[in-house]
Amino acid sequence: MVLFIKDIDLLSLMISKDTRELLSAIFIAAAAATMMSSVSGISAQQTGSKSGTIASLQNAKDGKPAWIVSGAWDFKNINSTSPTFNATFNMVMLNGSAPHKHNITDFKMSGSPTKKNTATTYNGTATVTLKKGPVTGVPVSVRLMGPQAMSLWIDPAKTENHFGNTPIYGTQHRVK
């Protein structure tokens, strides 16, 4: 039912003071309940999490695609000051040789996330497993692009350019 201001004024003249006070109390209670429900929804989003898959081609040192990268990632508490990012993915050469696995753990965000248009970028450091063992304090950048895509940049200098010269790309969805 839609009432206009003049209809409300006319209605208020037609009902008793007690009824007006009761309706006012009901309106205030409904508004408070709506506000509380939207606030609890916001706090649930603030501690939100994302997860998805990695599916990317990475370049060799000559700048040409050489590696297939696939795996999964999780990003928890993304709206807190200490979000948790973890990824596990496999790498294999385009010809199917040299399969191996990497993990990214212990993400520590530096500063605050930056937003540009629909993308949010989280910069920090993480531990990255390589053939020689885990490397700590590796600068990484996780970018969530809209509700669908993501990219992961891993500092080539700290990883002997193992992941090539482009970000690793993925989606913000997992196929189940």
Image: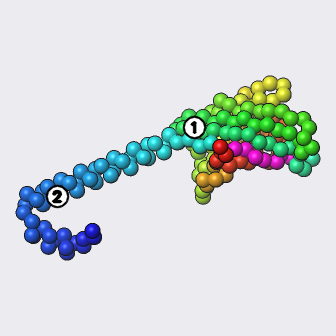
> Which residue is painted at 36% across and 48% down in the image?
37
Percent x, y of residue 151: 70, 47
What segment is highlighted magenta in the picture? 52-59
Answer left or right for 115 relative to 54.
Answer: left
Q: Label 1 amino acid?
A: Lys
Percent x, y of residue 154: 75, 40
User: Does residue 2 lie above or below 132 as drawn?
Assistant: below
Residue situated furthest top in the rendering: 133
- Crowd rating for badge 2 (residues with CA inside 10 Å; few <14, some 14–19, many 20+): few
Residue situated furthest bottom in the rendering: 6
Q: Label 2 amino acid?
A: Leu
| Residue 159 vs residue 15, the one in the foreground | 15
Answer left or right for 130 relative to 47.
Answer: right
Label number found at residue 39: none
User: Does residue 131 lie above or below 39 as drawn?
Assistant: above
Q: Secondary structure at mark 2?
A: helix
> Which residue is painted at 61% across and 55% down in the image?
146
Label number found at residue 76: 1
Report, in whole angstroms, how far the alpha carbon at label 1 lies from the one at label 2.
44 Å
> Which residue is painted at 44% across and 43% down in the image?
43
Q: Earlier in the sequence, mark 1 or mark 2?
A: 2
Query: Residue 161, can we see it?
Result: no
The C terminus, quarter of image? top right
Answer left or right for 162 relative to 173.
Answer: right
Residue position marked by numbered label 2 in the rendering: 23
